Image (cartoon, rainbow, N blue to C red):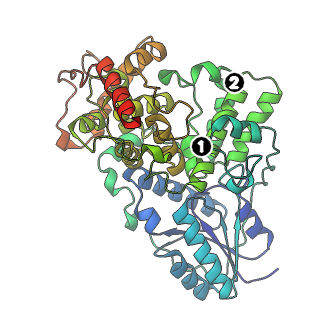
Amino acid sequence: MSDTPVLLWLRRDFRFHDHEAMAAAAKTGAPVIPVFIHDDQVEALGAAAKWRLGLAVEAFAESLSEKDSKLILRKGAPLTVLRALIEETGAGAVYWSRRYDKPGRDTDTEVKSALSDDGIEAKSFTGHLLFEPWTVETKTGGPYKVYTPFWNAVKGTDVAPEVKTVSELRTPSDWPRSEKLDDWKMGAAMRRGAAIVAKHVNVGERAAQSRLSNFLRDRLSAYKTQRDVPASGGTSGLSENLTYGEISPRTIWHAGYREMAEGNPGAETFLKELVWREFAWHLFFHWPDMAERNWRDEWNGFDWRRDNNDAEAWRRGMTGEPFVDAAMREMYVTGTMHNRARMIVASYLSKHLMTDWRVGLRWFEDCLIDWDPASNAMGWQWVAGPGPDATPYFRVFNPETQLDKFDKDGRYRKDFIAEGQANPPETATDYFEAIPESWALTPDQDYPDRLIDLKEGRERALAAYEQHKG
């Protein structure tokens, strides 16, 4: 065994099971020094995502300490930090899990090239996705642009088996200096909202594994019908843990696939949703500016409104549309939002309120603890119109009829809208504790009137689209 340490550079892979980079580092028999770097990409995260990332780092550091290891924290440019650690520790290799966003890829390419020139082994591994984006191509070559053909292409593909859990990491004789997580103040921008959202987070690998097991046991069989009902608790909730790599997509895939083989009626639908995330990253890899530019060029010049007072009412959950407002308030209270609700609020902002989809995308980026750059970008573009959808604009979700269909008993409204209730639940009143005090909102005030008649808003949106085409 070599005494020359390996640096294990962690980013969004805070787990021991199915962690290729960690397993490879452990297999060398060399001392392994886990490292997390607070770089410019971390600094640029929205308030909720940065806070939740801090919780993931903290939890993983505790898990490492249980194995007599440590997580070394450093702040700075990755290449500079890694070179300093190599100098301090005498490390001969750096291993990490690959990233697929353009800034992440650029950084990793720079680091790999520079360290290789330094004579250091720099090696990247899979881990964030089921399929590397460049490995899935159409029959004529090139990336897929529509989900269904993408699903058909990958559903019969063998997904690599999970890598066994790493139970032990050899420790170095001397540990390098580590910065203190508290000094980074990763939750500062959350302000008073952190205390509210903290009631709902599910942090760490053990919690993620438990969440998956409970879902498979209790809710998967009804997933096909219940996943669109926001108050049913019918979804897995695993988007939060996938975002921080507290569970791998392969673990979820293989668990779901076993259920499908055994005849569980909800399993295939669940796997399709997991592959929807894959499709988002497939697109984001091939169109890396998808969070800034219209995916379809013909939408350039469409007359969306810039940020406006109506959009501010939308942000505050004060539009007078119960489905929209309940969804926005759910996000402030729990840090997440039900997927059906995300489609409703995105459609309402971009179509009924004719507001640029990027206004909403940026707000989600700031407020979601499960924020994922690819899923967020594709979701907003898909709903707003410019994205990968066969009927890009004529789908205008009606929040009133959607509420009648998916919240028949009114539970979702009651869970998150306090106004008008004699004894509103904690989730409804917590909204007023989580939001900025400057909004000056209280649960005993009147619920707002509608911003716009729904029929009028729909007709205005369709007319604008027809005018743009003409």
Q: Quadrant of residue 213?
A: top right
State the image coordinates of residue 37 (x, y, percent, origin top left): 51, 70
From the viewer's side, name the closer residue of 131 and 10. 131
Note whether residue 426 is visible.
Answer: no
**Compared with residue 419, is residue 211 higher up or lower down, i.e. above or below?**
below
For residue 45, the mark is none
Question: What number of labels is visible?
Answer: 2
Q: Position of 261 compared to 188: left or right?
A: right
Q: Residue at x 22, y 26 (%)?
A: 443
Residue bearing mark 2: 266
Answer with mark 2 or mark 1, whichever residue precedes in sequence. 1
Which percent across, then down, holds residue 262?
Answer: 82, 26
Q: CA distance from mark 2 to mark 1?
A: 22 Å
What residue did someone put label 1 on? 207
Which quadrant would the C terminus be assigned to in this image? top left
Residue 436 sits above or below residue 428 on the image:
below
The kind of residue tagged 1 is: Ala
The kind of residue on which mark 2 rests is: Gly
The vertical placement of 314 against 264, above or below, is below
Secondary structure at numbered mark 1: helix
Apparent side of residue 193 relative to residue 278 in the rendered image (left or right): left
Q: Residue furthest front?
A: 470
Q: Quadrant of the N terminus?
A: bottom right
Q: Which image quadrant for residue 396?
A: top left
The foreground one among 396 and 57 is 396
Of the residues tagged 2 and 1, which is closer to the observer?
Answer: 2
Q: Find residue 135 and report its horizontal and vertical position in percent.
A: 74, 54
